[in-house]
Image (cartoon, rainbow, N blue to C red):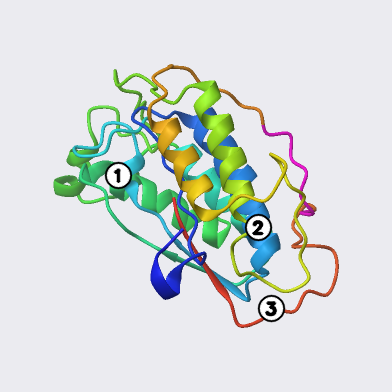
Amino acid sequence: MGAGSGKHHCLNVPLRDGIDDPSYVSLFKTIVEPVLVAYRPTSVVIQCGADSLGCDRLGRFNLSIVAHGECIEFIRSFNIPLLILGGGGYTVKNVARCWAYETSLALQLELPATIPESMPPEFRSKFGPDFELHPNLRTTVPNANSAKYLEKIRGICLDQLKWMRGAPSVEFSERYGGDWRDDDVDDAIEDEYADSNVGMERSWEGNGTRSENSYSGGDVVGKGLDAIVNV
């Protein structure tokens, strides 16, 4: 949640190795939407680090390019001015695939399923032997994010929104009861790191205010706050 003068201006979501598409996308949506509702930003900056893709040389997640892009599409659906940046990613051919695909989402264009033959051969050869835009990036890294862990992290993150300094007059109901001190929140997160169960869950049903292709259906005025999101 930050420290010093930055305390309560940052929301971090700790994830373990091997998280896959359903687990990640579900958690992303159920946390990012309340953050946008709480802050009501006038613009959003999203960093699309591709080291969260499966088969990355340094990353330990199991995300596909499609799931990565689904997170961008979700934020775009709020119709808030959006700046999309690159980031990490250490398997270069998959970074290129990912950013080409997400650029197409930003421009609302459809790309072919295979790398065009018109590409110079010295570049196209790097995407062989399948030359697909969306190769199978699943790895043997097990999903160490149990259903219990993901659900508890989701609840803790939503609880932390009560402490974050967002837009005024935005109320949140308590999810665990009582008022948590900062130490309580920190201790709860540390306790969850000790959970060694393995599994996954898609539990989000959606209960925010977002309508299709709309931020809130009403006239929302930002307070000079910008949101920065890492995918």
Residue topped by disc 2: 162
The image shows residue 62, relative to residue 27, as above or below, that is above
The amino acid at mark 1 is Asp
The image quarter in which residue 166 lies: bottom right
Q: Secondary structure at mark 3?
A: loop
Q: Residue furthest bottom?
A: 224
The image shows residue 15, relative to residue 200, as above or below, that is below
Magenta region, mostly helix, strand or loop?
loop
Query: Can residue 9 be spotted in the picture?
Result: yes
Residue 54 part of the magenta segment: no
Along the polypeptide, which appears first: circle 2 or circle 1? 1
Q: Which one is in front, 109 or 186? A: 186
Q: Which segment is the magenta one? A: 204-210
Along the polypeptide, which appears first: circle 1 or circle 3? 1
Residue topped by disc 1: 51
Picture coordinates of residue 179, whole percent (x, y): 67, 51
Q: Secondary structure at mark 1?
A: helix
Along the polypeptide, which appears first: circle 2 or circle 3? 2
Q: Secondary structure at mark 2?
A: loop
Residue topped by disc 3: 222
The amino acid at mark 3 is Gly
Q: CA distance from mark 2 to mark 1?
A: 31 Å
Horizontal side, residue 40 vs residue 108: left or right: right
Label 2 vs label 3, nearer the camera = 2
The image shows residue 57, relative to residue 172, as above or below, that is above
Label 1 vs label 3, nearer the camera = 3
